[in-house]
Each structure stands twice: as structure tokens, then as C-alpha cells.
Amino acid sequence: MSNREGFTSGLMIGATLGSLIGGVLGVVLTSRMSGENSSNQLMEPKKAKNKSNQPDAENMEMARLSLEDKIAQLNQAIDDVRQQLGSVNGVTPENTESLREDI
């Protein structure tokens, strides 16, 4: 029982010290990282920075084509799952078309 007498006070002291040490460490590391970023930003010309943030037409077209491919793959996967579930439930693709017409 003697071990439990100081448990609550030890827990509170440990939590307080851990919070203080963690807070100080976080502030120090954040200030170092922001200092590195600001020095890197001063070295780069502003035109190059703005240009890299703006997507050009070629990148947009590649992204659009990639999205179209992904959508086609998803549609194919949905159709496959629909067919598998239909065969499990005893519904054939012909029956699903007639069900769609009824709705």
C-alpha cells in the first residue's frame, strides 16, 4: 500500500513536467524549421515560385486523362461486383435490365 500513497502526486508531476518539456521542444523545433523555410524562400526568385504553383495545360491534360482512366477502371470494377452479387442472389444480368426498366 505504500506504493499507492504517492501515485497521484507522482502522476501529476510527471504529466506537468512532460507537458512543459514537450511544449518547449515543440517551440524550439518549429522555430528552427520555419527559419530554414524563410531562408530558402529568400533565395528563390518570386517568378519561379509562382510559376511552379500554376499547373500548365500539359499537366492538366495528363491529370484529366489519368482521372478518366481511373473512372473507367472503377466502372469496370462496379460492373464486375454487380455481376458477382447478381449471380449470388440468383439475378442474371438480363433480369437486372428488366428491373431497371420497371424503376
Image (cartoon, rainbow, N blue to C red):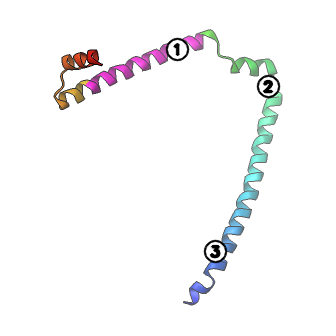
User: Residue 9: where, in percent of width, then height?
Assistant: 67, 79
Mark 1: which amino acid?
A: Arg
Q: Nearer the viewer, residue 16 or 62?
A: 16
Residue range corresponding to the magenta coloring? 58-82
Mark 3: which amino acid?
A: Leu
Q: Which residue is mark 3?
A: 11
Mark 2: which amino acid?
A: Glu
Q: Residues within 10 Å of mark 1 (few under 14, many from 20)?
A: few
Q: Main SS of the magenta segment?
A: helix
Q: Nearer the viewer, residue 39 or 95?
A: 95
Which disc is residue 84 wearing? none
- Identified at 79% across, 30% down, the residue is 41
- Identified at 43% across, 20% down, the residue is 70
The tag earlier along the polypeptide, 3 or 2, is 3
Q: Is residue 61 above or below residue 17?
A: above
Q: CA distance from mark 1 to mark 2?
A: 30 Å
Which disc is residue 44 wearing? 2
- Identified at 82% across, 28% down, the residue is 43
User: Residue 55: where, in percent of width, then height?
Assistant: 65, 16
Relative horizontal placement of residue 48, taking residue 2 as reference (left or right): right
Which of labels 1 and 2 is toward the front?
Answer: 1
The tag earlier along the polypeptide, 1 or 2, is 2
Q: Which residue is mark 1?
A: 64
Any magenta on residue 51? no
Q: How many marks?
A: 3
Any magenta on residue 71? yes
Q: Secondary structure at mark 2?
A: loop
